Image (cartoon, coloured by chain):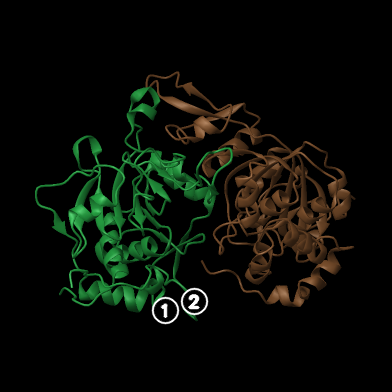
Amino acid sequence: MLDKRMTLSEIVSCLRDGMTIGIGGWGARRKPMALVREILRSPLKDLTVVSYGGPDVGMLCAAGKLRKLIFGFVSLDLIALDAHFRAARQAGSFEAWEIDEGMLHWGLRAAAMRLPFLPTRVGLASDVVRFAKGLKSVRSPYDDGEELLAMPAIKLDAALLHVTEADARGNTVTLSPDPFFDDLFARSADAAYVTCDTLVETKDLCLPERARYNSFERSLVTGVAEVLGGAHPTASVPSYGIDVDHLNVYSAAATPEGWEQYCAQFVNLPDHASYLDAVGGIGRIRMISPPVF
Amino acid sequence: MTATDYSLAELCICAAAQAWRDDGEILATGITLIPRLAAGLAKLSLNKSLLLTDAECYLVAQPVPVGSRGSLAPVIEGWMPYARTFDVLWRGHRHAMVAPAQIDRFGQSNLSVIGQYEKPKAALLGVRGFPGNSIHHPNSYFVPNHSTRALVANEVDMVGGIGYNPARWPRGMKPLGLDLRLIVTDLAVLDFGGPSHQIRVRSLHPGITFDQVQDNTGFPLSRPQNTDITAAPTLEQLSIVREQLDPHGLRQSAFKGNPRGDRSA
């Protein structure tokens, strides 16, 4: 039987310096944070990260892992701004490729379709086309002759995603209210690695009743890891909400000393079980209500 | 009937709600507290056909109140995840009111950085959906602190939301969906009704003069012959805002000291 189960460290050992890595989820919602912490513990460097950014980006910024960031925003949702991202951005410590979040969608879509670009109006007449290096426009070959932005494909070496449930073969269900763009991250990557809150037998994924929660097919998935609470401190609704208390602790740690202490307490731990203990246990995480926006 | 005792926040909510009055059946999006309450008020009073979300990913039949909802379960009338939101906005079926950090004389807006792009003095949220919104559907703005720091003399530091600046338009042609509507501030309501879309004072909040508004704006404003006074909220509007949309009174912290709406006293 096809068995794609991997440990967090096995997944991260497949990544290489300089890779372009897409991270699924959105802001402080359904981010594969256990994998992000595994990257923080690894020697990986010079990464290009593509993300609808939340604390995944902030932590990689704080740890100096980024060479380049492809993003439309970085936010902790209920806390508007990420202090670690801001500090790194203001220090000019990585190349910022700041684009409209719809352009990000379109770039992933182009890569997913193996196209060199997709046309759009988004970005034209704004500073995105001045500051994000390398963007070009294209003229419609039809009678309208309209000038459009040729949004280049954002090809990923790897995608990291967190879903609600998966089986060992890489079938997934994402039960949270918004699937975001995880399907496009998976489809535009050479390899997608998925963490799930619960690993189940295929029949217990309860398809076809939940077929609409199955965002992408298993042939896109290279590895699966069961990590209960693996999105913490971001939400994985309906299993748990955003841990705002923890994000406040994280936000307050946006100094070199603060970050060192945060890592000692929450990152440089022997395993995920120790992390759960450090943040108050899975029982506490499960008690965090879904966010109300 | 018009109210006499109302706050600046309530005045701004009611003035901002006017933005969606004649939009028909489109998605109304209000980002940050005052625009969100304004969109809810618009749906309940001025334009009942508006689509609204719960600020996450469901369309709701009635606006959801801000803050804790207790046992209230909104009636869901549709699904609007981010992917579909892009579909809607590219189709032009949306009017958003957002709160940029800077707006310039062209109506160009910025929520990305203050200072230089490569090494900004302040990194803000990011360009978000401003370029796509502004080139596809109507947009209005809310400025809680009308000042020359917010309404700037030169171009904004990073143009996210595009504006009436032909020098930046592809081949000088006005983009299809560019349509800027209102700028609601703590001093006045502005629009783009001056010559060549120059920003114009549409109405002054009670007790505010044109000179006060001009002095706090980094570019020359168009001044109509007769400047209206921003309409005071009606009792019906106030009751919707106070009882239905913001029962916990979050709007009281929208402006420092929660000032009165009529500042002529």
Read off the residue under disc 2. Answer: B68
The chain containing the residue under callout 1 comes to: B
The answer to whether residue A152 is visible is yes
Q: Residue at x 33, y 26 (%)?
A: B173
Which chain does green denote in the image? B
- Inspect the image, locate mark 2, and give the three-letter code of the amino acid beneath it: Ser
Q: Pointer 1: what residue?
A: B248
Residue found farthest to the left? B225
- Residue A162, given in percent of the width and then of the height, sits at 72, 56
The chain coloured brown in the image: A
Mark 1 lies on a secondary structure that is loop
Identify which residue is drawn at 53% across, 49% down: B122
User: For the image shown, how many numbered marks are present on the structure?
Assistant: 2
Rendering coords of residue B124 (x, y %) = 53, 51
What is the secondary structure assignment of the residue under circle 2?
Answer: loop
Q: Are marks 1 and 2 in contact (CB under 8 Å)?
A: yes
Tell whether B15 sits left or right of A250.
left
* Dots 1 and 2 on the same chain: yes
